[in-house]
């Protein structure tokens, strides 16, 4: 058992963990009043799986995250005008190998599966939102860089609303090697850049795509960009000329999944 437990405070994320890997949920804390309906469901399911459920005292949420930095994450339950501290302690979900993530890509989703690659995303809110998008749209898996990237902190679990539990991921030091594995499985690498001349509206869902999302400020790294078979942009229609990483991901994935 890992000593680096994740504190998860979104009841929907906790429910997803209890439903998919209850043995990895170490404990649940619920306010003395029982919390809202979602937390009551958490407590009931935890007891069903013999996970310890404790009464929690009210306190201001927030604390040290997985790398020791202070962060504030809003609790998802309010009672009588005060904040109640509800959370679960959960084992980190295990990553899979790149080989397993991309295996049989030509056959999955009728040969039209979609995967995501996150190239050095550092904002845990973006990473969590992308996992939520991936879970909503049925993305096959997510490739992440293991260095210069946000780890899967409690914030990522909370924002993903269960996406971390439902979408497999792999963490790799060398994206280029992972891209080679993906291409060996018949996948095409689709890069994204605000400077690309080709619009995302020209895309067809006629092959397995690995969609690459670059760093929030710098975009894709040079070697990543060079590995892409196609690179597209999301052209603005108004005066605001850019989207953040998770919103751009949602736009691209919504477009691709709408195509037959």
Image (cartoon, rainbow, N blue to C red):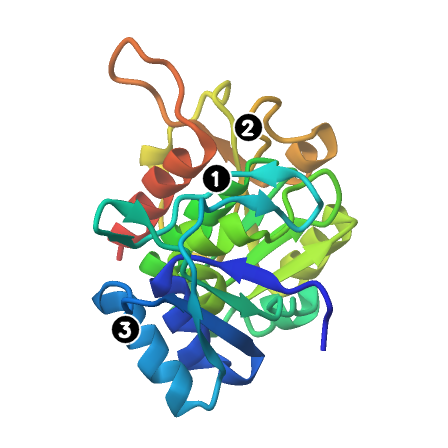
- Residue 183 image position (x, y, % from top left): 64, 57
Of tags 1 and 2, the one toward the viewer is 1
Q: Disc 1 vs disc 2: Cβ atoms closer than 8 Å?
A: yes
Judge left or right: residue 85 versus residue 153.
left
Residue in the image at 68% along x and 64% along y: 98
Residue in the image at 42% along x and 49% along y: 159
Specify the quadrant that holds the N terminus: bottom right
SS assignment at label 3: helix
Q: How crowded is mark 3: few (under 14 residues within 10 Å), some or many (20 or more)?
A: some
Relative height, residue 103 to residue 236 (above, below) = below
Relative height, residue 221 to residue 252 (above, below) = above
Q: Earlier in the sequence, mark 2 or mark 3?
A: 3
Q: Residue 40 carries which label?
A: 3
Numbered circles on residues, count: 3
* Residue at numbered disc 1: 126
SS assignment at label 1: helix
Q: Nearer the viewer, residue 91 or 116?
A: 91
- Residue 95 image position (x, y, % from top left): 65, 66
Judge left or right: residue 35 versus residue 18.
left
Q: Nearer the viewer, residue 249 or 111?
A: 249
* Residue at numbered disc 2: 216
């Amino acid at each position: 058992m890992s000593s680096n437990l994740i504190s998860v405070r979104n009841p929907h994320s906790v429910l997803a963990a209890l439903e998919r890997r209850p043995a990895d949920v170490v404990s649940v804390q619920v306010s003395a009043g029982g919390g809202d309906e979602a937390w009551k469901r958490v407590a009931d399911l935890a007891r069903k799986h013999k996970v310890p459920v404790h009464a929690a005292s009210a306190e201001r949420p927030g604390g040290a995250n997985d790398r020791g930095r202070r962060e504030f994450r809003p609790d998802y339950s309010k009672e009588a005008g005060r904040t109640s501290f509800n959370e679960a302690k959960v084992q980190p979900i295990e990553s899979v190998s790149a080989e397993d993530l991309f295996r049989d890509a030509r056959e999955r989703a009728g040969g039209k599966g979609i995967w995501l690659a996150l190239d050095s995303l550092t904002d845990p809110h973006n990473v969590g939102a992308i996992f939520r998008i991936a879970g909503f749209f049925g993305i096959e898996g997510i490739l992440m860089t293991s260095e210069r990237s946000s780890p899967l902190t409690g914030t990522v679990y909370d924002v993903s609303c269960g996406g971390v539990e439902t979408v497999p991921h792999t963490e790799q030091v060398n994206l280029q090697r992972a891209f080679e594995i993906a291409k060996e499985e018949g996948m095409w690498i689709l890069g994204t850049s605000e400077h690309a001349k080709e619009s995302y509206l020209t895309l067809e869902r006629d092959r397995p795509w690995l969609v690459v999302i670059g760093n929030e400020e710098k975009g894709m790294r040079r070697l990543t960009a060079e590995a892409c078979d196609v690179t597209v942009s999301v052209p603005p229609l108004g005066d605001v000329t850019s989207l953040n990483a998770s919103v751009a991901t949602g736009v691209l994935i919504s477009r691709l999944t709408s195509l037959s």
